[in-house]
Amino acid sequence: MQLDGKNAVVTGGDRGIGRAISFALANKGANVAICFHKDEKKAQETVEQLKAIGVKSLKIQADVRDFFQVKNMMDLIKKNFGSIDVLVNNAGVSGSNPAIENISVEEWNDVIDVNLTGVFNCCKAAAEELKRNNGKIVNISSIAGKMGGIIGCHYAASKAGVIGLTFALTSELSPHVTVNAVAPGPVDTELISEETKKKLSSLTPFGRIAKPEEIAHTVIYLLENDYVSGEVVDVNAGRYMD
């Protein structure tokens, strides 16, 4: 897919990996709608910076856990942009307790609802439009979805679920829509403390964690290649290999 002039939706597009993906899309000439949950100021700053690149951009507040909010968001984006060609499901949370003994049922449900049900909601709400436009879906999973890790079983389970959903939708939506996932290792964002960054860097063969732009670069590759579907691309500098 040539991204110039296409219309993209990035959930969690106002911060971290999602923000890097939004800018990577804009630099390719794509119009970008970002879904945000709480930080409207940050979302507006991102939108203004995207517009400065020379593309259309808008922000929409929505809770991806709520299908009706997601459906309204997709309708509004289509109304403003005319169509939806690309969906990047990036919104996610990690939870606050890594040990199963300390994870409440409420925390489990919240992580699963945002990280997995949220991806389902967005795919369901956009599927018909994407099929009409021979569109693209890229889901952001995680190394934790393949090997567990220190963040918690709820996070690992949700990200493993994203991989399974990616495979299922690949079969269901072919040949009209390509569906892929990216499984990053730890990424250098404001959500990780400096102490945790140092710890995670020591576990990585390259001695550092990924930059958000390196994940965004992989997303762009999956969007531009029309013959890649049903893939989960690992971006972890050799920490996990399958």
Image (cartoon, rainbow, N blue to C red):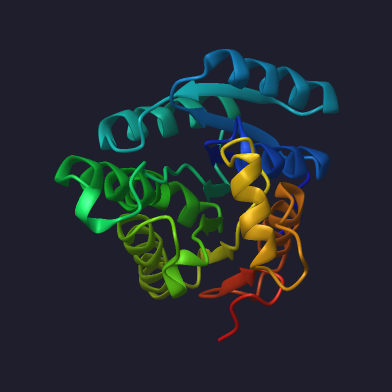
Q: Residue at x 61, y 19 (%)?
A: 42
- Is residue 94 depicted above or below 221 in this figure? above
Q: Residue at x 51, y 62 (%)?
A: 142
x, y percent for residue 77: 51, 29
Image-based side of 86 in relation to 152, left or right: right
Residue lying at the far bottom in this picture: please name it: 242
x, y percent for residue 93: 42, 42
Is any atom of residue 223 visible in this view? Answer: yes
x, y percent for residue 152: 36, 57
Image quadrant of residue 155? bottom left
Q: Which residue is drawn at 70% across and 57% down?
A: 209
x, y percent for residue 148: 41, 69
Q: In which quarter of the image is the N terminus?
A: bottom right
Image quadrant of residue 81? top right
- Is residue 159 depicted above or below 92 in this figure? below
Residue lying at the far left in this picture: please name it: 105
Number of marks in the rendered image: 0
Is any atom of residue 7 visible in this view? Answer: no
Q: Which of 233 and 84 is in front in this view?
A: 233
Q: Nearer the viewer, residue 59 or 153?
A: 153
Q: Residue at x 68, y 23 (%)?
A: 46
- Is residue 226 depicted above or below 198 in this figure? below
Q: Quadrant of the C terminus?
A: bottom right
